[in-house]
Image: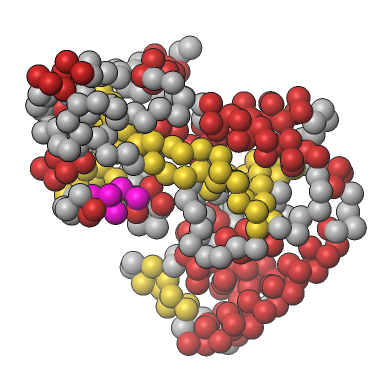
Amino acid sequence: MDVLQLRVLREVARRGSISAAAEALDYTQPAASRQLAALERTAGRPLLDRRARGTRLTPLGEILLRRAEAVLAELDAAQADLERFEDPGERPVRLVTFPTAVASFVPSAIADARRRAPGAAVEVELRADARDATAALHGDRLDVWLVNAAPRERLDAHVHAVRRDPFWCCLPAGHPAATAPFVALRTLARERLVVTADSLCADRALVLDACAAAGFRPRIAAHSDDPATTQGLVAAGVGVALLPEMALTAVRDDVVLRPLGEPLRRQVLAIVPRDAPPRPGRDALLAALRAAGAAWRPPALRAAGPVGEDPAPATGDRRESPVGAQSAEGASKMPPRSIRGRSPQSASSR
């Protein structure tokens, strides 16, 4: 057995499927399956219990995994020791981040970082799954890890606030609430929602927890991890959605964005290993991320208010704005702010 086979086995145990493990390791699924098959041939017995709804380790697989964790931890520690003698200037600053960050403010932050530290190169890796915090910090040679939720485990790291990203309610253009000053979360109990597909996604958990706090369990109409697909489902009348602002780089002209009556935001954090050696390029990138994250707004929302403003109205009846209804008092204090954007075709042509 070799190290690669053990890494694939560990990822399958963590993620519950061979396809998810392959994606995490940047392999194709057939390649990951071949590594596992070779490991099972070496073991002489099955290590995996393959089922329709996922893959689990057999008892023998669990025993091997415990040994593999120890082996891989030692190898990662050895790599870290070697890197302490490496000239940090010889390699790019490695940023691990998530898709909507790259689609929004990360590119301008990288440009700013290069101005702050001329000659610094940045290597970007997309990783939507922020669950493996310890492994990401100590086994992956990263310099900055950008996440969209506070890690649930205690980390030996420095954590920097980058952005508080508000959620908006995405409605079909003809929805009764499209002209209301805001949408109260509790009124969504009568709607069907489009939510992210990954049950472990931080955005999904945040939305479901907010619905529970408002006193209802949402009726889910569809699942989508792609913001453009979510907008398409909303435009077609499949359901409504709560989308983070960073996912609104392009807004269709057949959907409307309304602020929520109760603030709902996700935390965007930059995490740096505590024992990381000094790196001017990393420090420049960190400063640039904080500046760009705080300042960024999608084009369709730039007219909705200054950066950092609570998208919900500051006046008027915030306790409950029935979907499709707007009180005369609320209308006089807060004019409707119906935010529409261009269709995906128009946005892509600019």
Q: Is residue 318 magenta?
A: no
- Residue located at (24% from left, 53% from top): 213
Magenta span dominant secondary structure: helix
Is 169 drawn above or below residue 52 in the view shown? above
Q: Residue at x 50, y 68 (%)?
A: 14
Q: In the rendered view, tell whether residue 184 sits above or below residue 255.
A: below
Image: 348 above or below 161: above
Q: x, y percentage for residue 191?
A: 14, 41
Judged left or right of residue 181, residue 305 is: right
Question: In which quarter of the view is residue 24 placed?
Answer: bottom right
Q: Is residue 171 left or right of residue 140?
A: left
Image location (x, y in percent) of residue 262: 27, 39
Q: Which residues are magenta?
A: 206-211
Q: Position of residue 137 (x, y in %)?
A: 65, 58
Picture mark count: 0
Residue 139's place in the image compared with 326, above or below, is below
Q: Residue 72's quadrant in the figure?
A: bottom right
Residue 37: give x, y in percent of width and height: 56, 73
The answer to whether residue 306 shows anywhere in this view is: yes
Left or right of residue 84: residue 62: left
- Give me the residue at 65% from left, 54% from top: 158
